[in-house]
Amino acid sequence: MLRGNLDNPLIIECFNFNSNGKHDLVGQIQKSLADLEKLHCSEQGENLFLPTGIGLNYHNKTLKSKLFVHKFSESVQHTFLDYVAGGCELNLMVAIDFTASNGNPRLPDSLHYIDPSGRPNAYQRAILEVGGVLQFYDSDRRFPAWGFGARPIDGPVSHCFNLNGSSDHCEVEGIQGILTAYTSALHNVSLAGPTLFGPVINNAALIASQSHANSQQKYFVLLIITDGVITDLQETKDALVKASDLPLSILIIGVGGADFKEMEVLDADKGERLESSTGRVASRDIVQFVPLRDVQSKWRNLGCSIASSRIASTIFNLHADQRYSPTKLNYSKDCIYEFYSVFISSQMPSPKLSPGFKLTS
């Protein structure tokens, strides 16, 4: 708000509250942050004034009422880019819904239909738009990528299979690698169901916990792209509560025209934090849900509403019990993770990390 200048003026207004909403101005004062700090140190008050008159006859009426500053504190709030510059790396993971509710991929009305003209379907668009932003914060751009809710050839339904078809590794190279693996998977699996989030969340949490145990300065974002209502709501809540202590956040993109009320339950922005079946409450909200249909028509408009820009990415700020600077940051047990949504338009330039980018210790 002050753009780093402690001498920029602030106008502080005092009102008399009225239940009808028409509050009466009692008085006001104009002081900079530096002035307020001086008032705190001097333990003296400053008289409020009341603007009177208009035009050339304008003057301030000094009042007997005074402003006292009983407490003053200043702290530095590091941005996401501060942490990136300090050696913290963002790692993207992707999970794609292959349940039958998406429709037959061979038919044009399917959400998984691959258009011969090259026009991306909803899943491809979500990968390109969201993953395209997040990839620039990942130094090696090797992304774990999974599918769920499908039946591999001659196999049972899998709720977390490697998108690249490999039996021993799940990583693909770059956003194009995700798109290629996704297209290939459509030809090698049969869409099935039900829609379960628990297995992919647990898999992502395992990777984040291993990094956490090794004291690596990494933060993970799991991008889940789905078309419908989940059938393991409580199991998903349990997995999310368990993962809430890890350096992990989950961005759910809803595609198609389904009812996404349960997704909004998982996104605790408007309510209480999630509670597991054992009564444990999540230490923080790690889920952000965005329906793709709400933002498609506005995506390219930089002046659009917050809802339309939220689709780009989820980033975080870290606040600790002690004042960790980005260059000293580590994921110890004393560190509290607070997840915030930072809205970045796809047209906003994204910082690119050099090939030689290294994590600092």
Image: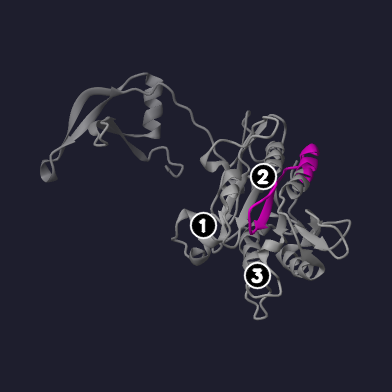
- Residue receiving disc 3: 110
**CA gap, disc 2 and disc 1:** 27 Å
Separation (CA) of disc 1 from disc 3: 26 Å
Query: Mark 3 Cα within 10 Å, few/some/many (few <14, many 20+)?
Result: some
Residue where numbered disc 2 is placed:
233
Label pair 2/3, CB-CB below 8 angstroms: no
Up the image or down, 14 lies above or below 159; here it is: above
> In the displayed structure, does residue 326 sit left or right of residue 298?
right
Asked if 36 appears above or below 204 in the picture, the reply is above
Q: Which residues are magenta?
A: 206-232
- Which of the marked residues, 1 or 3, is nearer the chain's N terminus? 3
In primary-sequence order, the first of circles 2 and 1 is: 2
**Amino acid marked by disc 1:** Ser
Relative horizontal placement of residue 360, taking residue 77 as reference (left or right): right
The dot on residue 20 is none
Quick one: 188 or 7, which is closer to the camera? 188
